[in-house]
Amino acid sequence: MVREEPGIKISYDTSSKTQPMPNFYFYFDKNFTIYCYFGIDGDECPDYYDYAYNESSYYPYYYSYEPKGQVSLSTSSDYFFEIYVDDDTFDSYNQSTPMYMQAIDIEYPYENKKPKFIDTIEVSNSYYLTQSNGTNLYFFEFYRLRREELDGSFFSLLGFNPTYEKYNYIESDLQLVVYNFVNGYGFYAKVPVTLKTPITEVEKEQRTRTILEVLANIAALYGVTLSTYVLLFGERATRPLLEKFMDPDGSKV
């Protein structure tokens, strides 16, 4: 028996005018600092920073900005990250390891069971920030999606009022522009964060066949087969074996 994979129906949720800013994670092999500001006046971002150092030989320095839903963006509002390297061993012309940046939706990691495409969520929206011939400007633009997966319960498989597990995640683009201004000693890169659209794209799982539909098809096929059998061999051929060889009063034929 072939397992049927559910199809996806796409719709759009236009009820919101803003979307929560994703969580951002930065990794580098040199010591660095990140400053965040927003708006025309350059107001300082709320303090949702975290930073750490580990013994990794690739990315021992870690920095994150995790607003966790406390910061909302519209298409007319921008956040800016400015990254500064604070390490005397850093040489932009001979730097072999780029900075690693990842953005992820605020609901990750998900409290309920993980979505089927969790591996894709964990590796997508990841970028390398390089600095080869000067400082760079990276335009980060994102939008939000919601996947609604059938929960796999018995009643959902039957087709009775199916229930869904819902997961929000993001998709993004990163555009690199050479930045001709240096904002101070150790300046590495600038990352403006913008919302592409406040509309949420909804991906809803749908099965083309439920168990009830399969059973109905089997019953219909049985009915056609039985009718053909009766037509070819007569009605007596469909009676139980004992009934065919017994008289109505119970004596043998």
Image: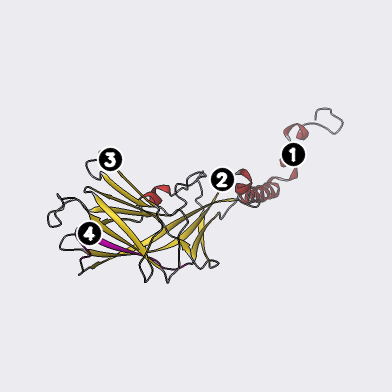
Sequence-wise first label, 4 or 2: 2
Question: Circle 1 sits on which residue?
Answer: 239
Other-residue count near label 4 (Cα within 10 Å), few / some / many at <14 / 14–19 / ≥20: many
Other-residue count near label 2 (Cα within 10 Å), few / some / many at <14 / 14–19 / ≥20: few
Amino acid marked by disc 1: Arg
Amino acid marked by disc 2: Gly
Mark 3 vs mark 2, CA separation in Å: 41 Å
Question: Circle 2 sits on which residue?
Answer: 152
Q: Is residue 85 above or below residue 42?
A: above
Asked whether, in this view, residue 138 is left or right of residue 4, the answer is left
Q: Inspect this view and state whether residue 211 appears.
A: no
Q: Is residue 187 magenta?
A: yes
**Secondary element at tag 4:** strand
Q: Which residue, as the protein is rendered here, is positioned at the far right?
A: 249
Question: Circle 4 sits on which residue?
Answer: 188
Q: Which mark is residue 54?
A: 3
Other-residue count near label 3 (Cα within 10 Å), few / some / many at <14 / 14–19 / ≥20: few
Sequence-wise first label, 4 or 1: 4
Question: How many labels were placed on the picture?
Answer: 4
Query: Which numbered disc, 4 or 1, marks the residue closer to the eye?
Result: 4
Q: Which mark is residue 3?
A: none
